[in-house]
């Protein structure tokens, strides 16, 4: 198959996937491969009654964890923070008291930065875990969609209403609560708010002119298009606190082109050194939060080869969000994949879309 035909089929496959699913109201995808001389940046659907545009900004959801992880890596290289540091070393108040109690014993002082990064702390997940009693965080958000939750509020609610899962380092449990703690630590280390730290250490150096962390103030980096709508089934939640208060867990707004700049900087070791990136591959081990075949390191998700089940061509690394957002790199063919389906619980569908694009690229004949 010639490259031109493969690109045309990729575009058709993407638009077909979006249009056949009524829950996908708008979607974005960028496929870039210098090795194959491909740069496809497309959008489909509508947002706020207007056609979706490839240059449009959208929520990244949990992809933001990789940005926070890279920021941690930058500070690690500057010797301002260590992956072995205990989280309690950065707090002088009672915020973390009784944070991690498991079978009657408190383990808070044993949690290290590395445990937060690869979700092996055993901490609660405010976003998905059920509360001991009463309403879940998601229920409260939908009851009061515009109520603002500071990071400290979420940590306090999580430790008071949810149970810890295991001692630090002895399992895997995805924890947005943990990443909120990490965000506060990074603020402590840099003396900046998290959105200022991300701007100074990542966005500005990489000329990511359309990327920012949502905060209470509107960013001056808003583009000429409105931020893409995001749906939970048939409800548009774009302006809900469910996204605005995701903070270090995934509160970043960006575009596919800016995401490409970020991933290229990681691949080419322009933002952190290769040795630091290799350190981020401290996989959580047998435990994972999707299914067998996925490793999770420091904000880094990696699909590994499994004979018959998962061919080598699907070996990609990056991160994904619960709204069907994705940001991955496939080393063998030097392919980058960025985008979003903007529908909650569509993370696996975003990954499957990437696999379909990979299938087409592998059919290109030199």
Image (cartoon, rainbow, N blue to C red):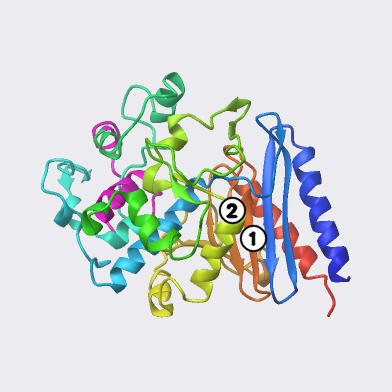
Quarter holding the C terminus? bottom right
* Whole-percent x, y for residue 121 in the image: 30, 54
Q: Residues within 10 Å of mark 2 (few under 14, many from 20)?
A: many
Q: Is residue 122 left or right of residue 302?
A: left
* Whole-percent x, y for residue 45 in the image: 73, 38
Write the residue at 32% across / 46% down.
180
Can residue 118 be seen from the camera position used here? Answer: no
* Whole-percent x, y for residue 12 in the image: 83, 51
Q: Which mark is residue 326?
A: 2
Residue 112 found in image quarter:
bottom left
Q: Which mark is residue 163?
A: none
Q: Is residue 22 left or right of residue 286?
A: right
Q: Residues within 10 Å of mark 1 (few under 14, many from 20)?
A: many
Asked whether 17 falls inside the magenta stretch, the response is: no
Write the residue at 19% across / 59% down.
86
Query: SS of the residue at dot 2?
Result: strand
Cα–Cα gap, marks 1 and 2: 7 Å
Pointers 1 and 2 in contact (CB under 8 A)? Answer: yes
- Work out whether residue 130 or residue 320 is closer to the camera in this orientation and state it: 320
Query: SS of the residue at dot 1?
Result: strand
On screen, residue 299 above or below 334: above
* Whole-percent x, y for residue 191 in the image: 22, 55
Write the residue at 40% across / 23% down.
140
Question: Outermost residue toward the top?
Answer: 143
First along the sequence among labels 1 and 2? 2
Can residue 34 be seen from the camera position used here? Answer: yes
Q: Which residues are magenta?
A: 157-186
Quarter holding the N terminus? bottom right
- Work out whether residue 155 or residue 248 is closer to the camera in this orientation and state it: 248
Q: How many marks?
A: 2
Q: Which mark is residue 337?
A: 1
Write the residue at 67% across / 48% down.
28
């Amino acid at each position: 198959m010639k490259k031109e035909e493969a690109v045309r089929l990729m575009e058709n496959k993407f638009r077909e996937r979006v249009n056949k699913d009524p829950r996908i109201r708008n979607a974005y995808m960028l496929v870039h491969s210098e090795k194959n001389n491909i740069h496809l940046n497309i959008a489909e659907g509508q947002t706020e009654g207007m056609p979706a545009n490839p240059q449009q900004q959208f929520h990244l959801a949990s992809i933001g964890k990789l940005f926070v992880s890279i920021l941690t890596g930058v500070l690690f290289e500057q010797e301002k923070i260590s992956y072995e540091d205990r989280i309690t070393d950065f707090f002088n108040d009672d915020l973390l008291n009784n944070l991690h109690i498991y079978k009657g014993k408190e383990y808070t002082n044993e949690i290290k930065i590395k445990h937060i990064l690869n979700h092996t702390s055993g901490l609660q997940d405010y976003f998905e875990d059920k509360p001991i009693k009463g309403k879940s965080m998601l229920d409260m958000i939908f009851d009061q969609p515009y109520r603002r939750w500071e990071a400290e509020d979420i940590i306090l609610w999580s430790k008071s209403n949810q149970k810890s899962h295991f001692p630090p380092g002895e399992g895997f449990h995805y924890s947005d609560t943990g990443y909120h703690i990490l965000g506060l630590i990074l603020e402590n280390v840099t003396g900046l708010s998290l959105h200022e730290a991300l701007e100074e250490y990542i966005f500005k150096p990489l000329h990511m002119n359309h990327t920012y962390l949502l905060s209470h103030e509107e960013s001056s980096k808003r583009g000429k298009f409105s931020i893409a709508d995001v749906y939970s089934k048939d409800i548009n939640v774009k302006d809900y606190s469910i996204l605005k208060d995701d903070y270090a867990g995934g509160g970043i707004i960006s575009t596919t082109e800016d995401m490409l700049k970020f991933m290229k900087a990681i691949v080419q070791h322009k933002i952190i050194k290769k040795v630091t990136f290799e350190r981020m591959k401290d996989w959580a081990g047998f435990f994972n939060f999707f299914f067998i075949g996925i490793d999770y390191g420091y904000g880094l998700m990696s699909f590994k080869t499994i004979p018959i089940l998962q061919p080598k061509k699907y070996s990609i690394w990056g991160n994904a969000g619960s709204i069907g957002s994705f940001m991955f790199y496939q080393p063998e063919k030097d392919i980058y994949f960025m985008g979003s389906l903007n529908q909650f619980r569509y993370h696996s569908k975003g990954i499957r879309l990437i696999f379909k694009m990979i299938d087409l690229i592998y059919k290109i004949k030199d």
